[in-house]
């Protein structure tokens, strides 16, 4: 199955830390752990057989096509949906039975902002902060949250007067106001300009570095690069979980090296470079001067490639690792895994 490689790297299901008796002594339990987690809505949608462990102090990102199960997984983790089968624990508890103190440790930003249209941005933020029990002297913290999302000058506007993107930014500020230790952010940067998106991700990284844990879904595949671990969901199944670099390797079968000659490269050179390629890969000419080859280890392969070219009196202009954009990585992962996911569902 497409997700077997990830499962092989995890503890066997029976040892996943979702036993209410707690993890083994001396170990750090995951903030979120699921075993064979399934939600069947009865119409072919939902999630199927998800095994997952999110470590504390990390950013875990879910990416996948629309309808792949990203939001459903988050809602299962929050207790909004109950599993059809399987198990999930968040902060050591069953989400359906969260203690009030546990809920106060969690921040949640839904896809559709839950705001009051007739209240101002400040009134919304202040009200939500009061629900979490923030003290009366909370104004500096709320101002800081508004500044982060670029709404400090719009705090007196009613939500109904704010654009859709501004409402999402206000929802994010509301989620961060009580400084939760675990955040679930469902499409937090949708509809936000690239400059502010980067600023928000920089702040999310600061939260991670401050021992917060973040579970983020995103429609911007390139944002996978900001995550520590990424889960790719396809048709409700977890196809792969890996680091951003691990996803690139999984998509391409190794690391990618582009070699550019000072002169047009003879076809014999292009085909000869096959001895450096990972099994089953063929070097590909990008133009008359440049060839791309997938190798097992770029740092080890590049010196050997240069020596090989020197022996054949091929003058090399550049030889460097190419890091494919995540849009390309995602397309390849979907192409590689969608057939196997369908087979697993059959």
Image (tube, rainbow, N blue to C red):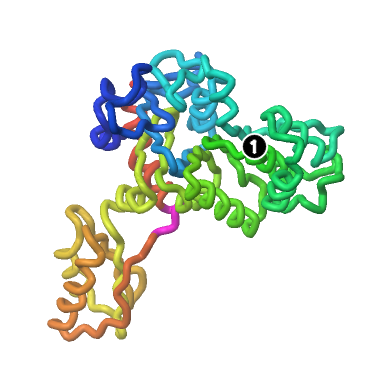
- 344 shown above or below 304: above
Nearest the viewer among 196 and 263 is: 196
Nearest the viewer among 235 and 156 is: 156
Side of 59 relative to 317 (left or right): right
Side of 317 relative to 199 (left or right): left
Instruction: Write the residue at 32% across / 67% down.
Output: 321
Tell me where residue 168 appears, x and y as whole percent: 69, 41
Tell me where residue 345 appears, x and y as whole percent: 35, 23
Instruction: Write the residue at 32% across / 71% down.
Output: 320
Q: Quadrant of the N terminus?
A: top left
Nearest the viewer among 158 and 90 is: 90
Instruction: Write the residue at 36% across / 22% down.
Output: 18
275 falls in the magenta region: no
Tell me where residue 160 appears, x and y as whole percent: 84, 38
Secondary structure at badge 1 equals loop
Q: Is residue 327 visible?
A: no
Tell me where residue 78 appears, x and y as whole percent: 54, 24
Q: Residues within 10 Å of mark 1 (few under 14, many from 20)?
A: many
Q: Quadrant of the C terminus?
A: top left
- 3 shown above or below 103: below
Q: Is residue 48 visible?
A: yes
Instruction: Write the residue at 77% across / 32% down.
Output: 127
Q: Quadrant of residue 289?
A: bottom left
The residue tagged 1 is: 178
- 158 shown above or below 40: below
Range shown magenta: 324-328
Counting labels gives 1
């Amino acid at each position: 199955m497409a997700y077997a490689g990830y499962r092989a790297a995890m503890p066997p299901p029976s040892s996943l830390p979702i036993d209410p008796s707690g993890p083994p002594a001396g170990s750090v339990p995951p903030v979120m752990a699921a075993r064979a987690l399934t939600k069947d809505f009865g119409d072919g949608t939902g999630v199927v057989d998800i095994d997952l462990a999110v470590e504390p102090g990390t950013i875990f990102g879910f990416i996948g096509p629309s309808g792949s199960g990203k939001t459903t997984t988050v809602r299962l983790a929050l207790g909004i949906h109950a599993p059809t089968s399987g198990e999930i624990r968040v902060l050591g508890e069953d989400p359906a039975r969260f203690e009030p103190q546990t809920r106060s440790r969690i921040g949640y930003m839904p896809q559709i902002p839950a705001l009051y249209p007739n209240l101002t941005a400040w009134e919304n933020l202040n009200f939500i902060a009061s629900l979490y029990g923030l003290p009366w002297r909370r104004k500096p913290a709320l101002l800081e949250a508004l500044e982060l999302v670029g709404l400090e000058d719009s705090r007196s506007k009613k939500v109904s007067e704010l654009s859709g993107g501004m409402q999402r930014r206000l929802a994010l500020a509301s989620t961060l106001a009580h400084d939760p230790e675990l955040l679930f952010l469902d499409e937090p940067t949708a509809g936000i300009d690239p400059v502010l998106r980067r600023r928000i991700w920089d702040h999310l990284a600061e939260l991670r570095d401050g021992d917060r844990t973040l579970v983020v879904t995103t429609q911007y595949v390139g944002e996978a690069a900001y995550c520590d671990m990424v889960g790719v969901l396809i048709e409700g199944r977890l196809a792969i979980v890996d680091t951003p670099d691990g996803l690139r390797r999984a998509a391409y079968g190794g690391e990618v090296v582009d070699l550019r000659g000072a002169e047009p490269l003879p076809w014999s050179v292009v085909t000869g470079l096959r001895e450096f390629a990972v099994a089953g890969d063929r070097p590909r000419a990008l133009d008359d001067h440049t060839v791309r080859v997938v190798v097992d280890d770029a740092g080890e392969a590049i010196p050997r490639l240069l020596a090989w070219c020197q022996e054949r009196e091929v003058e090399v202009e550049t030889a460097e690792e190419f890091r494919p954009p995540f849009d390309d990585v995602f397309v390849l992962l979907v192409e590689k895994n969608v057939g196997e996911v369908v087979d697993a569902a059959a």
